[in-house]
Amino acid sequence: MKTAVILLALFFPVVARAQSDPGRAELARVHVQVCYGTDGDATQAGPSAKPAPEDLIERMEHGGAIHFKTYRILGEDTQPLLRSYENWAQPLKPSDEVLVRFEAQGKPNRQTAVIDLELWLARKKVVKTDATLDMSKPLFVLGPEWRGGRLIIAVSLAPKAKPADK
Amino acid sequence: MNTPPDDTTLALWLEDELTGDARAAVEAWAAAQPDQLAARAELRQWKRQIASVIPAAEEPPHAEFFNSRIARAIRQQDAPTVPASRRPGWQRLLVPLAACAGIAFAFVVGQKTAHPPSVAAIDVSQAARALPVEPLIYTPVKGTHAEWINHGDTHGSPVIVLDGLDAIPDSIDLTGTASHVIPAAHGTATAGLFTPPVPGQP
């Protein structure tokens, strides 16, 4: 009982601060997927990698910049886009080999949001850009080579979490 | 209390920040100090005036960065001009007439004093189109090159192609132990709870 009271006392200021700071308001959510594309043996991605859905493959290959025989999804993460703070997505938890940092630039509309976006690989920032994210069109980053293929990072906008999800 | 308080305590009392015994002690001393009482009254009046003008709470602005401002400036340039204010007809004609007369005068003078141009004329008609319309990409790692590919149609997604990156060693198991697990607390993570990997890195 005593421990619960102490934990409650420690936790309450954090909750109160989050509720009172409008800069922490959730504008939207950012969904990050890490895919593995290869022309060789797709099992190199590991047993827990899932086949990529057809619509995602179609979007990746649409312009011809990305083309592999096989695609696997290695991991994904969804994090809120905050009004005045940066946030991070860690799609390969617990590994921090791939991280995506993002920060809102202005007020998004229902379908798109302009964000300041950074991709970090192996704890180093490798690219920074200001991208317009769309609900239906992910931004793809054709990244580094790995096990005979390449990593593809897909970043897209996701709807805001419903209050019950929080 | 007959001894005057120190400067810090007096400043706190003037700002109504003292409480308890300390406040009572200074109040007792200040009762015989009309100038201090007047100073406190003046400060209180000043605070009331400020409070009546400044809102108690203010919404923070949405972040707006360099490119957003450029885009807004371009939109403002393209916006239709505001109609001129109503003036008498002869006043509205005065400016264009004066401008035409000036142009004609400059043309005549130029014809009489013209010399062949010594340098090639610079075509600036396309200058506005040189403004960046695609997102800026910055690659801090030396030897890395990024290319932005935007297909321009409604179906295609933008692609950033990174070249020159070091390959991730095959020995690293990216799928690790928790692939596809979206954290239960997603949607509540906030800045400050997640520390950037290596502060000071590019």
Image (spheres, coloured by chain):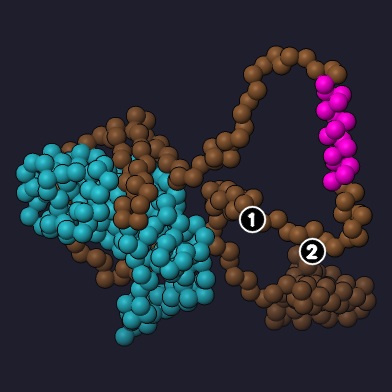
Chain colours: A cyan, B brown
Name the side, left or right, on which B55 lies relative to A112.
right
Q: Secondary structure at mark 2?
A: helix
Checking the image for residue A56, the label placed there is none
Q: Quadrant of residue B89?
A: bottom right
Residue B172 in view of the camera? no
Q: Amino acid at mark 2?
A: Asp
**Residue B129: % across, % down:** 54, 40
Label 2 or label 1, whichever comes before in sequence order: 2
Chain holding disc 2: B
Residue at image location 67% in from the left, 76% down from the top: B56
The residue shown at (32%, 62%) is A136
Question: Vertically, is A133 above or below A118?
Answer: below
Which residue is painted at 57% across and 36% down in the image? B126
Position of the C terminus of chain B, as image quadrant, is: top left
CA neighbours of label 2 inside 10 A, class few (<14), some (14 to 19), many (20+): few
Please tell me in which quadrant of the rendered image residue A53 appears: bottom left
Q: Nearer the viewer, residue B179 or B87?
A: B87
**Above or below, B165 relative to B94:** above
Q: Position of residue A8 (x, y in %)?
A: 38, 80
Q: CA distance from mark 2 to mark 1?
A: 58 Å
Mark number displayed over residue B79:
1
- The relative height of residue B102 versus residue A155 in the rendered view (above or below) is above
Q: In terms of secondary structure, what is the magenta stretch mainly? A: helix
What residue would you read off at disc 2?
Answer: B7
| Residue at image location 61% in from the left, 35% down from the top | B125
The disc labelled 1 sits on which kind of residue? Answer: Ala
Chain that bears disc 1: B
Is residue A38 in sight in this rendering?
Answer: yes
Tag 1 secondary structure = loop
Query: Which one is in front, B5 or A83?
Result: A83
Does residue A107 show up magenta in the picture?
Answer: no
Q: Which residues are magenta?
A: B96-111
